[in-house]
Amino acid sequence: MNQNTKKLAFSGIFIAIAVVFSAFSIPVGVAKVFPVQHLINIVGGVLLGPFYALAIAFGTSLIRILIGTGSLLAFPGSIFGAFLSGYLYKYHRRLLTAFLGEVLGTGIIGAVCSYPIALFIMGNKEAALFGFVIPFISSSLAGAVIGMVLLKTILWKGQIKLDSGTF
């Protein structure tokens, strides 16, 4: 099977997983975090690369909006972290950089980019410039930790060898 066909098939599977489990949340203090998208961002970024991870995040966000389980904030809340996670892993080959890319991309860049969407497109006049940072960081941290544990477990058991070109 062609490498691009495998990547496309895995992208579709990752989108399906992210959409199906998008309602799963973990209560953290007064907030709820939705870690599955961020878990998928890390796994997709590491196994498939930055552009496939970006496409997975975009596809998941679009489907969630179309079926009514997400808002427009799903786009900046996932695409920046997915791309940065995959990009940093591609050039540094360390899972820690994928983790940092997800948390910084979603928690900082995605949160700040959500402000104009909330203010001008969604009409939320109470939105603050850094008001999304803490919820986005909480959610991305939870998902990134779960994603790292999953990847470490898979790698430790020898199921996937990242440098062998499996994907």
Image (tube, grey):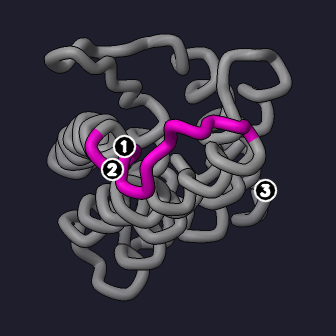
Name the residue rendered at 30%, 56% in the picture. Answer: 103
Along the line of sight, the residue nearer the viewer: 17 or 115? 115
Name the residue rendered at 67%, 30% in the picture. Answer: 71
Task: Give the main secondary structure of the magenta stretch.
Answer: loop
Task: State the quadrant of the N terminus.
Answer: bottom right
Residue under label 1: 136
Along the line of sight, the residue nearer the viewer: 92 or 122? 122
**Does the stretch in magenta take in 128?**
yes
Q: Distance between the residues labelled 1 and 2?
A: 5 Å
**Does the stretch in magenta take in 34?**
no
Name the residue rendered at 53%, 67% in the picture. Answer: 83
The image shows residue 38 at horizontal and vertical percentages of: 41, 42
Along the line of sight, the residue nearer the viewer: 153 or 125? 125
Dot 3 crowding, Cα within 10 Å, few <14, some 14–19, many 20+: few
Q: Earlier in the sequence, mark 3 or mark 2?
A: 3
- For this view, does 83 lie left or right of residue 121? left
**What's the amino acid at mark 1?**
Phe
Look at the numbered disc 3 and give the secondary structure of its residue.
helix
Residue under label 3: 5
Q: Can residue 150 be seen in this view?
A: no
**What's the amino acid at mark 2?**
Val
Q: Name the mark on residue 133.
A: 2
Task: State the quadrant of the C terminus.
Answer: bottom right
Q: Give the range drawn in magenta.
A: 122-134
Q: In which quarter of the image is residue 89?
A: bottom left
Along the line of sight, the residue nearer the viewer: 12 or 79? 79
**What's the amino acid at mark 3?**
Thr
Q: Which residue lies furthest to the front in this view?
A: 125
- For this view, does 60 lie left or right of residue 137? right
